[in-house]
Amino acid sequence: MELDEAETAALLAALELQIAWGADEALDEAPQDRTLPRAAAPAAAAPAAPRPTPPRPAITAPAAAFTPAATRAGELAAGADSIEGLRAALAALNHPLRETAGNLVLSDGVPDSGLVLIGEAPGADEDRQGKPFVGVSGQLLDRMLASIGIERARNAYLTNILPWRPPGNRTPTDAEMSLFTPFVLRHLALVRPHHIVLLGGTAAKALLRRNEGITRLRGRWHSLEVPGLGPVPTLATLHPAYLLRQPAGKRDAWTDLRLLRRALDTKNEIET
């Protein structure tokens, strides 16, 4: 059966429409002859009997949790008996981040202040100077803390989950956070804080082991179990780098800072 020019144009237009919508293959097992009358169209074949699904293999724990690197990291962290010992343990860890970073960035501030703030990783300025939170976001953090009477040189201690800057300031991977968490926990056991503040979603995810984002975790106190120290009240809040990109978040950050100030004041009242 031959089609006239109008019918051919209509069919081509319908085909172009299907292509524009993303159709790129026929879904039927065999092409249908659209030129036949509807009653004469061949009957659809009966569906084939489903094939039995083979049993799935058992799911095992990821091998990364038991790698020699993770075992060595845990041993090095556990063996550190001072902050300098922890620095030496990190320096002894052969990790690819060392090859692209300039300096090991461990901490800044007063170790026995009782308040530890933890970020995710050093940036370019921190990598050059070897101290955490010295760039633009660190300057904002200093102003935020000063608004509630806290100074890193007097009554705060700062560190990160990662001691080396990731290439291009990328977000730390889950494997990296898992590898360095034992060092962070050992760090906390050494300085023995009575309050911890987690700056940003990466630090909160690494230490609180929760799937919620930072906007759901912030604004309330959590309990972080630190080996050798016990549970420590822990507050998650927005990272200052995020606040530089999203100034509207400063209202929530200010709410969190006031929550921290009240907790510190309550502790001081109990002690006096």
Image (cartoon, grey):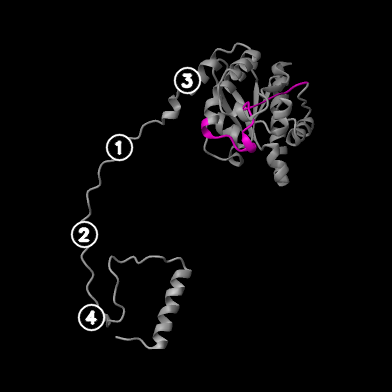
Q: Is residue 251 visible?
A: no
Q: Are marks 1 and 4 in contact (CB under 8 Å)?
A: no
Q: Residues within 10 Å of mark 3 (few under 14, many from 20)?
A: few
Q: Which residue is mark 3?
A: 71
Q: CA distance from mark 1 to mark 3?
A: 27 Å
Other residues around mark 4 within 10 Å, as few (<14) / some (14–19) / many (≥20): few
Tag 4: amino acid:
Ala
- Label 2 neighbour load within 10 Å: few <14, some 14-19, many 20+: few
Mark 3 falls on what kind of element? helix
For label 1, the residue is 57
Q: Quadrant of residue 238?
A: top right
Q: Which residues are magenta?
A: 154-175
Q: Residue type at mark 2?
A: Ala
Q: Please give the residue where the numbered disc 2 appears in the rendered image.
A: 48
- Can you give x and y, in whole percent of width and height, for residue 29 in the image? 28, 65
Q: Which residue is mark 4?
A: 40
